[in-house]
Image: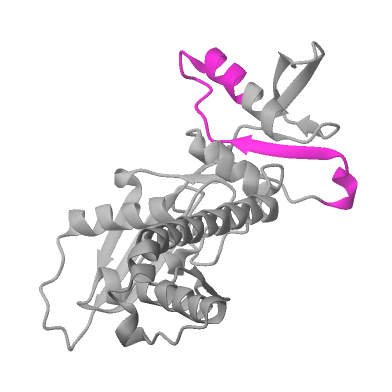
Amino acid sequence: MSYSQENGYLPSDFQTIMGALRVKINEQFGTTYTSENFEGTNFYKYFYALAQKVQDNEVLTAEIFIKLQDYIASTNERISRPVNTNTGIIDRLKVLGYTASVKKIIEADAGKINICIDVDDSADDYATVKTEIATLISQITVAGCVTQGDESETIVLSNGQSFDFKFHLPNKIPVLLRLTIETSKNNLNLIGDPDDTKFKLIENINARYRLGLDFEPKKYFDIDDDAPWAGDIKLEWSDDDGATWSDDIYDATFEDLFTFGLDDITLVET
């Protein structure tokens, strides 16, 4: 059975195993069997079943080694991204159906953690959801790390102690969006339907933007993927009902979330 860094353990084939047995038989009994005349001998018949068993065991050993490698890799991944890191907390809550962001730790926040959850506090079942979120936070944050936020729920831990676990609600910022598309003079493509263009923009933003991320206008709509008929594209946002417009990146806090709907998008085609 061979081993390499690239492929791990590789089981020997049947002929290799029988060849090794033949060499040992020659050494032990003073015979001179070759690979050609060894077949058909009583030794060959006797060790045939043994060689098959050895081969089966080597295959199983190789499979176990592969599973062990997978286990070590997955364990290392969990170690490198533990749940109690910012990314780990966000990923864990995402798996459980919640979009979250976590404030980056600064010296002034030592021992504190600020988690923001994108949830509707006006929903009829919010009281239940609030308790569920606080319970989840109690399970994925480090003991001794004090959670911060306006939303608070007292949770009884497995040791019988009760603690308040808190989180923030998003700072929702209603915005208007204006997408300006200048048709290319070299265009040979059909120009997209305006409603389809708006839907595509919303689809792109939903896939690339979420709570706590900077709003990056140039990231959400481009010529190559979304508007091959265009020569130039500019996406702008306004947070003052259209009094002023900007295509700059919005520098978000961990609580900030731009909100808009299809009716808040203006498409300008030139």
Residue 13 pos. (x, y %) = 38, 72
Q: Is 226 in front, or is 51?
A: 51
Say whether residue 60 is left or right of residue 87.
left
Identity of the residue drawn at 31% across and 84% down: 37
- Front in this rendered view, residue 81 or 85: 81
Q: Is residue 116 above or below residue 185?
A: above
The image quarter containing residue 222 is bottom left
- Is 14 on the left or on the right of 152, as rendered? left
The residue drawn where x is 42% and y is 59% is 50
Residue 115 on the magenta span: yes
Q: Is residue 252 visible?
A: no
**Image height check: is 218 above or below 154?**
below
Q: Is residue 266 above or below residue 154?
A: below
Residue 88: x percent and y percent? 64, 46
User: Furthest-top residue in view?
Assistant: 160
Residue 240 locus on image (x, y percent): 51, 49
Q: Which residues are magenta?
A: 106-133
